[in-house]
Amino acid sequence: MKSEFQNPADDAPFLTRVQRVLPQLSPAERRLGEFLLDFPGELGSYDAQELARLCDVSKATVSRFIRKLGFASYDQAKKAVRDERQTGSRVFFAHAEPEANAAALALDMREDKDNLDWTFANLDPSELEALAAAVVDSRKVWISGQRISQSFAHYIYWQLTKIVGEVAVFPQGGETLGEHVARIEEGDLVIAITLRRRIAGTRQLLDTIAESGARLALISDETMARHPAAHWHFPCRIHSDGPQFNHAAVLALCHQIVVRATLKAGRTGRDRLRRVDAVNEKLAQYE
């Protein structure tokens, strides 16, 4: 018998399904639902009996709950959670049991080292050198980043603005992409940072930038395919066993770009940097 909540064509995300049925659940089912809102990835890690134990409910309660979500079986729900774990929210990596979080709290920085090793092993140093030269030679450097990517866009901007004349980050708060992309032209360089989870329309944005004739450099996570118009693409491994992506390799790559660009800028860059420091000293910007 189908549940009144079951919809065979339902392709809603797992968390959306849970939130949708929560008001109609029995107390035991609601306890299970609230647990999975906090730790959805646990459904992909345990069988029904183990999940029932974690939530202090019966296995029958788990089965009823799964049907109300619109899944035909526990295995089907488990597969959906595992699939969504690959592309969805990092909440799917949170664990309810303390020992399961031990790796995320380790101080040996294993994840950082592994991500750095993977990223730089898959990087061509000559491409970094070519990008650094483009930073110095371009009419204007545009740095694009949204969500977490904007943090790294601002880092690169903050460093490059001291050595090159024209550099901008977009979009800023309240701005549309078009206000900036419409001004990008041939002779410019765009560094687009596109880390997971990417904003919808990322491919269209990159297509439009490419149409401008500007050179395009991508900094992405390891899951993104190279855009056909990209002059350079630097995938960074951001894998983590914890509830947050590990961006150590992204920051290291950004540092390599700005250091190499600073060296490429030569005397002109050094003179500009000295002028910036001199003005800051004059304005008493530093203690």
Image (cartoon, rainbow, N blue to C red):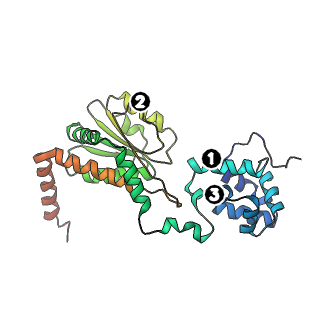
Side of 84 relative to 7 (left or right): left
Q: Which residue is mark 3?
A: 41
Say above or below: 193 vs 105.
above
In space, the residues marked 3 and 2 are separated at their CA atoms by 35 Å
In space, the residues marked 1 and 3 are separated at their CA atoms by 10 Å
Q: Are marks 1 and 3 in contact (CB under 8 Å)?
A: no
Taking depth in this image into account, of 36 and 269 the one nearest to the observer is 36
Estimate the x, y position of residue 258 in percent, counting from the top left: 25, 50
Taking depth in this image into account, of 3 and 126 the one nearest to the observer is 126
Q: Residue at x 20, y 65 (%)?
A: 285
Q: Residue at x 34, y 48 (%)?
A: 120
Taking depth in this image into account, of 144 and 245 the one nearest to the observer is 245
Q: Which of the labelled discs sits on residue 228, or is there none? A: 2
Label whose residue precedes the other's in the sequence (1 or 3)? 3
Judge whether residue 151 can be spotted in this image: no
Amino acid type at mark 3:
Gly
